[in-house]
Amino acid sequence: MVAKRIIPCLDVKDGRTVKGINFEQLRDVGSPVELGKFYAREGADELVYLDISASAEGRQTFTSLVEQISREINIPFTVGGGISSLNDASRLLNAGADKITLNTAAVADPTLIDRIAARYGRQFVVIAIDARLEEDGIWHVTTHGGRRSTDLELFSWAREAENRGAGEILFTSMNHDGTRQGYPCDVFARLSEEVRVPIIASGGAGSVEDIAKVLTAGHADAALAASIFHYGEISIRDLKRQLSNQNIKVAL
């Protein structure tokens, strides 16, 4: 049995880690490099860095930051945000990122998945899917941080992404994100049946039990979280110890 992964997520704006609600009321929570080193020491299996800078200068700062991270951190890290071309992906992978994540740009041009996977291999491509359960009973894929709904349906888009070369799917339920009331485990379980690649669960984590449920009942391969780690509500080491006590295989 492959060990389940615990992945802190760090939003980066102009070179600093920030945390807010829907990218508003942002608070500085520290250096991305120092936080990454801390989480690596705490036992994080991987890290995700998302660039939420709006300016070209912020993008350049992020690329330089990726180079620093690659020198200082000894665990795999994925980067995303603002990647809309093969050149963008190449720039960040060449700077030292282990994987890149695509969301809005992949919906706008699905062939971007094919081209990056063909150049670098599917193991470098993570497709992030933000979806919302609408009144029509369909999980509609959203873009632009969940602000724009599309006609794409969650499960069919996940299958297409996998067929085009995605090596992992990072799914966030917009209905649950920020509620801290747990994940829709039935949806994650179905997603794990629809695709063969690993599933990363994101959004909704408010407790150890929430994470335990999505890794077991939801069949997720990894859990990604931010606030509960950034604000010290639980350490990664303690989280893993409690998961292990529930017979969930994690790397201690």
Image (tube, rainbow, N blue to C red):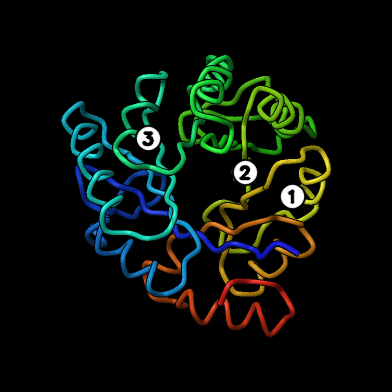
Q: CA distance from mark 3 to mark 2?
A: 22 Å
Mark number for residue 188?
1
Q: Is residue 160 left or right of residue 116?
A: right
Q: Position of residue 33 (x, y in %)?
A: 25, 58
Q: Which residue is mark 2?
A: 171
Q: For the residues carrying marks 3 and 2, which lies nearer the camera in this image?
A: 3
- Which image quadrant is residue 110 in? top right
Q: CA distance from mark 2 to mark 1?
A: 8 Å
Marks 2,1: beta carbons within 8 A = yes
Which of the marked residues, 2 or 1, is nearer the chain's N terminus?
2
Q: Which residue is mark 3?
A: 93
Q: CA distance from mark 3 to mark 1?
A: 29 Å
Q: Amino acid at mark 3?
A: Leu
**For the C terminus, which image quadrant?**
bottom right
Binning the other alpha carbons within 10 Å of mark 3 as few (below 14), some (14 to 19) or many (20 upward) gives many
**For the N terminus, which image quadrant?**
bottom right
Q: Is residue 215 above or below residue 69?
A: below
For the residue pair 148 and 54, the one nearer the viewer reads as 54
Q: Amino acid at mark 2?
A: Phe
For the residue pair 4 and 173, the one nearer the viewer reads as 4
Q: For the residues carrying marks 3 and 1, which lies nearer the camera in this image?
A: 3
Judged from the image, the secondary structure of the residue bearing numbered disc 3 is helix
Residue sitting at x 44%, y 76%: 233
